[in-house]
Amino acid sequence: MHGIDRGKPGGTEAKGALSLTDPEPRTCLVCAEFTVDLICETCKARIQGEAIVRKREDERGAAV
């Protein structure tokens, strides 16, 4: 069984250690744009906005 070595070659980091000081760009889980976070700021704002709208609609439906 082989582990994934995420450390830099020749570096002093432990095998499999992730660097918190130099995040590598990756793709957003929602739109596939490059970001250092799992979800980019644009998608995060859209998701939060949709949740607020849904919550308001649910509250209005419960009050009637």
Image (cartoon, rainbow, N blue to C red):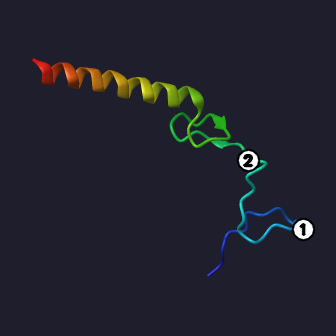
- The residue most toward the left is 64
Q: Which mark is residue 20?
A: none
Which residue is more in the foreground, 26 or 19?
19
- Helix, strand or loop at disc 2? loop
Which amino acid type is shown beneath numbered disc 2? Answer: Pro
Q: Which residue occupies 14% across, 24% down? A: 62
- Helix, strand or loop at disc 1? loop
Task: Identify the residue under disc 2.
Answer: 23
Q: Which residue occupies 88% across, 65% down? A: 11
Task: Identify the residue under disc 1.
Answer: 10
In percent of width and height, residue 55 lies at 29, 26
Task: Please report whichever mark, 1 or 2, sits nearer to the chain's N-terminal start.
Answer: 1
Q: Which residue occupies 44% across, 28% down? A: 48
Q: For this view, does 6 lie left or right of residue 50?
A: right
Which residue is more in the foreground, 34 or 61?
61
> Quadrant of the image for the N terminus?
bottom right
Please say if 47 is above or below 10: above
> Quadrant of the image for the C terminus?
top left
Which amino acid type is shown beneath numbered disc 1? Answer: Gly
